[in-house]
Image: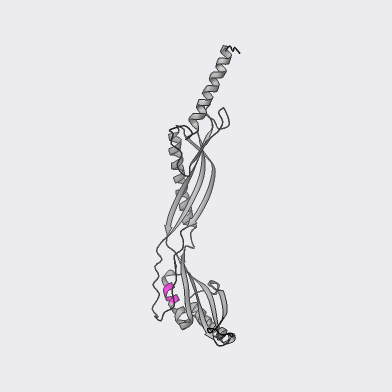
Amino acid sequence: MHLTFTPRLRAVAAGGGAAALLIGAYALGAGPGSAPPAAGTTVTTAAVGNTAGSTGGLPAARVTVTGTGTVSGTPNQLMLSMGVQVSGPSVSSALGQANQAVRRVTAALRARGVAPADIQTSDLYVQPNYQPNGAAPSSYAVSESLTATLRDIATAGAVISAAVQAGGNAVVVDGISLNLSQSSGLLAAARAAAMADARTRAGQYARAAGRGLGPVLNIAEQSSATPLPYANSAAGDKASPVPISPGTQQLSVTVTVTFTLT
């Protein structure tokens, strides 16, 4: 078949070729030898044409990046997990001993300024003990556990020691954890840092693409705290305050932000 190109047809063909070149230029990372976007960064483009958001006939484009902000703070409260373990010839005798020990521990916590609302029963366990090859229980073990929120780190060591002494040899300390209970200000600072990080990253990609950075289209947040310090220990005979070192704890916020490219 013989085809003849008129000037009008030649113009249409040339326009289609130019559009194909523009699509290849703005689909970042698609061509051979071009650097792929960094991890956590997605660059997308709209179709060629005078669509909403396009400037000067160029295609509307956007860039999605992640930014992270991390701040540190000093824990201001301690979570204490402790309890008592006793054995007796019967369930009633073992339970009675455990109850008395828990009452002494609770009284010691209250005497050191721990509010009733900050003391909570967390577990109760009764188990029969058997001798080797024995058919009937030889004794019964009872454990009772509680958690206490100590809101003054400076006195927490003395409170723990007093509670352990009150419970005597029946006491078991399961562990402690240090918390940041007042974190709203730290989270605000972490969010601001995360947004600044995202804007810096997006600006770098915009300049690399020969574009300007436009308004924000979307923001998604993910916040997290570092694992809480946790330590296992057993009751001792010393009456001196338990040394508590609060150290620091980090809070991190990660945001995924989509910007327009102008």
Q: Where is residue 191 in the image (x, y as percent from the top left)?
A: 48, 50
Q: Position of residue 22 (x, y in %)?
A: 51, 27
Q: Does the magenta stretch include residue 156?
A: yes
Q: In which quarter of the image is residue 15?
A: top right
- The residue drawn where x is 54% and y is 75% is 116
Identify which residue, 63 or 199, lies in the foreground.
63
| 71 lies above or below 62 | below
**Magenta region, residue range:** 155-160
Q: Position of residue 76 (x, y in %)?
A: 45, 65
Q: Is residue 212 magenta?
A: no
158 sits to left or right of 98: left
Q: Which residue lies furthest to the right in this view?
A: 1
| 145 lies above or below 63 | below
Identify which residue, 181 or 105, lies in the foreground.
105
Which color scheme does this rendered protein use? one colour
Q: Quadrant of residue 71?
A: bottom left
Identify which residue, 140 or 43, lies in the foreground.
140
Identify which residue, 133 or 87, lies in the foreground.
133
209 sits to left or right of 51: left
* Main SS, magenta residues: helix
| 111 lies above or below 57 | below
- The residue drawn where x is 42% and y is 76% is 158
Quarter placement of the N terminus: top right
- The residue drawn where x is 48% and y is 50% is 254
Q: Where is residue 78 in the image (x, y as percent from the top left)?
A: 46, 68
